[in-house]
Image (cartoon, rainbow, N blue to C red):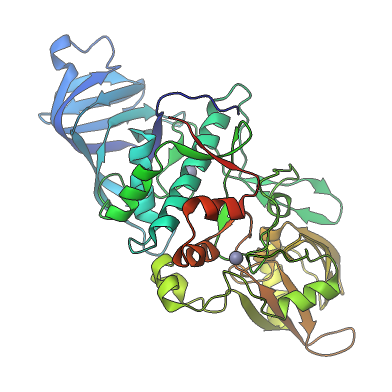
Amino acid sequence: MAIETKDEPLITVGIMERRDHVEGRLNGTFSVDGAGPETDRETNRLTGGFSAIAAPGGIVLRDAAGRVVGRSPSFRIKGGGPATFDLFGVTIGSRFHWERSENQTFHGNLVLRAGADGTMAAINEVPVEAYLESVISSEMNASAPAELLKSHAILSRSWLLAALRRKRGPQRTRGEAAHVPEREGEVVRWYGREEHDLFDVCADDHCQRYHGVTKITSQGARDAVRQTRGIVLAWGDEICDARYSKACGGLTEEFGTAWDDARHPYLTSVADAPDPYPPVTTEIEAARWCLSAPYAYCNTKDEEILKEILPAFDRETEGFFRWTVEYPHEELEQILYEKSGFDFGRLQALVPLARGPSGRIFRLRVIGTKMSMIVGKELEIRRWLSHTHLYSSAFVVRAGDAGLTPERFVFHGAGWGHGVGLCQIGAAVMASRGSSAEEIVGHYFPGTTLRGLY
Ligand SMILES: [Zn+2]
Ligand SMILES: [Zn+2]
């Protein structure tokens, strides 16, 4: 993924997927590419309402009066300038309790593409920077400090352009949702981002949340993108696959604790503090780490900062730096059974076998009276030990009673999320104390530089 300087790329963002029809309105005059032989020259201009239906042999595109504009597996409907288009009934918050549909407005081009399963996708083709203005507005609170918004713009741009290089590059590999190496007595999984077939990124949290121009209300987010235009985080000639999580807990984590063993030299462990801390290497050190509250940028209870960066429902999570979760043995056995599908019998012990430098466990032995199993990596461990997810896999377990059959299991943990890359709460604290975006990303991604691509 060498960096070459070129123009600002266009990206394709999937707005609606697996639809049998799409309706909307073109606010301006658009030209239609790819309408196929049955389109005469006069009808390749289109304005106002339109509808498209997925049919055998391709998509049938109609104008406001219901006249067929064309039939094709793919249309590119080009606006240009200030022209916008609306899509009706876009699903947002899919899979969340607040899922609903709304009409959304976009700049750039509308692409309609038929999928292999006989459905279609509505796609927005848009310049990268316009896309980022929308993403940063959607993901960050408008009142967040300017240098934090700029850090986020640089990270989002880096992640996106690194993903595009991977996807469009010569040795394109299909990402998989879950990676499961097979070994007797072990369930070691991690979750990557599945690649999309018909477009580069989706508009949902799976990639980055994007609502077109509908929700760009934050001048701060817009300024942050404009002031960092074309700038990415680079490691030598490579665009960094920049990661971030909510709160590291005092030390950030290495890439391999959460994903595959590939080493990314810039995704290494650093102290979330001005001076370094030694890595957590033994169980004694893990206990000392999880049961104490060392100085760290993300060790904050500053309501103002948390309000600026966390959505309201996240702020209910008060203990994210150090936390405690406790279960009677029956409850934890039931959770383990539901999450893993294995009946361990009476739970005897949870034994950490390997930890990353932040204390996050990536191999854990679960021992019951009926069976024993090794689980990894960090996300799978968090899934197995909670009705939802444990905040992190950096924990020590204290059994409620001495002896071989504990009555209760008490988890004392550190941090929130995988801990790899930038610590969002730590970065917000750094920004509020006057650090620049360059200092913030330099702190969490040591050895990287900022490079202007266009
Ligand atoms: Zn996606
Ligand atoms: Zn942190």
Quadrant of ligand 2: it is bottom right
Residue sitting at x 57%, y 79%: 319
**Going by the picture, which residue comes out furthest to the left?**
65
Q: In which quadrant of the rendered image does the N terminus lie?
A: top right
Residue lying at the far right in this picture: please name it. 403
Q: Position of residue 72 (x, y in %)?
A: 32, 19
Locate residue 172, reporting x and y percent: 60, 27
Relative horizontal placement of residue 60, taking residue 401 as reference (left or right) = left
Q: Quadrant of the C terminus?
A: top left
Choose top left, top right, bottom left or bottom right for residue 347.
bottom right
Residue 29, visible in the rendered structure: yes
Residue positioned 16% across, 20% down in the render: 45
The answer to which quarter of the image holds residue 260 is top right
Q: Is residue 93 visible?
A: no
Q: In terms of depth relative to the viewer, which is nearer, 109 or 279?
A: 279
Residue 16 falls left or right of residue 375 = left
* Whether residue 259 is situated above or below residue 73 in the rendered picture: below
Point 33% across, 47% down: residue: 134
Point out residue 323 in the picture as x, y percentages from the top left corner.
Answer: 63, 79
